[in-house]
Image: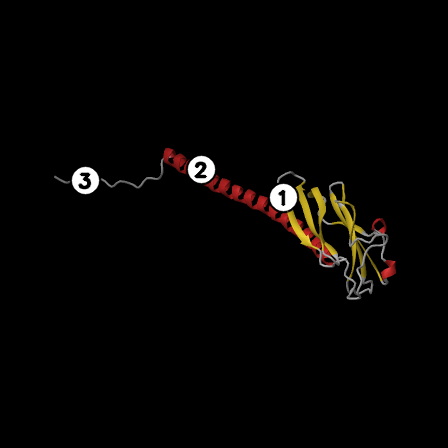
Amino acid sequence: MATQRVTRQPRGFSLVEFLVAMTLSLMAIGLIGSVFISAQKVAHQRSKQLYLLQALSAVFQSIEGDIQRAGFDNYQGDVLTLTGTNEVVDMRSSSDFGLAYYREMADNKHFRAIRYRLDGDALLVCEQGAQQQAAIKALEAIGSCRSMLDEKNLRVTEFSLTPLPLISSSAQSSLWTLSMAVQRRDLSYSHHLTIDIKQRNWQ
């Protein structure tokens, strides 16, 4: 008796198998996509934080350097001040102050008059130079102001400079405390920083 061999034809995926595979693939793609989007959001937030911190650090470096140079007269045996004051750092208020010092400049205006002031939620720096010491301006007369921060994205919520006098038998100086807080305008991040600055030039 002859035996017939039955050959099974290979079959493809059934509709149910195909739907299950497609569902699992979509779930995997969705999971990978959500992880990627979350990572992008975290990176974006960190970049905004870093931008604020770098801006704040640059402001502090500028003010710290100017206070340390305040009064320097290029070794002429005197202390430079703004017109109308005997103070090395002339303070109109804790958020509005100015100073003068000698610094070599390409335009020969070596006598620098600097003013820092809070204007609303913007921090302004004003700077003008003079070729002669007698031409150094008074605090209120210093022009050429510009914002120290990106006003479209950052706002100053606190800015103050306070002195602690250091007095010896023959001279006096100050230890200055600079405090500043900056916030992103979208309210996503803010930071507060305080440092002490030693005035180098004694009166």
Q: CA distance from mark 3 to mark 2?
A: 47 Å
Q: Which x, y percent locates residue 139?
A: 83, 50
Residue 65 figure quarter: bottom right
Of all residues, the one furthest to the front in this rendering is 169
In the displayed structure image, the side of residue 36 where residue 66 appears, left or right: right
| Residue at 68%, 48% in the rendered image | 177
Q: How many marks?
A: 3
Q: Which residue is mark 2?
A: 27
- CB within 8 Å, label 3 to label 1: no
* Residue type at tag 2: Met
Marks 3,2: beta carbons within 8 A: no
Query: Which quadrant of the rendered structure holds the N terminus?
Result: top left
Dot 3: few (<14), some (14–19), or many (≥20) neighbours within 10 Å? few
The correct choice, above or below, for 119 with respect to 171 in the image is: above
Location of the C terminus by quadrant is bottom right
Q: Which mark is residue 4?
A: 3
Q: Nearer the viewer, residue 197 or 115?
A: 197
- Mark 2 vs mark 1: give the one in front: 1
10 Å crowding of disc 1: few (<14), some (14-19), many (20+): some
Q: Who comes first in sequence, dot 3 or dot 1?
A: 3
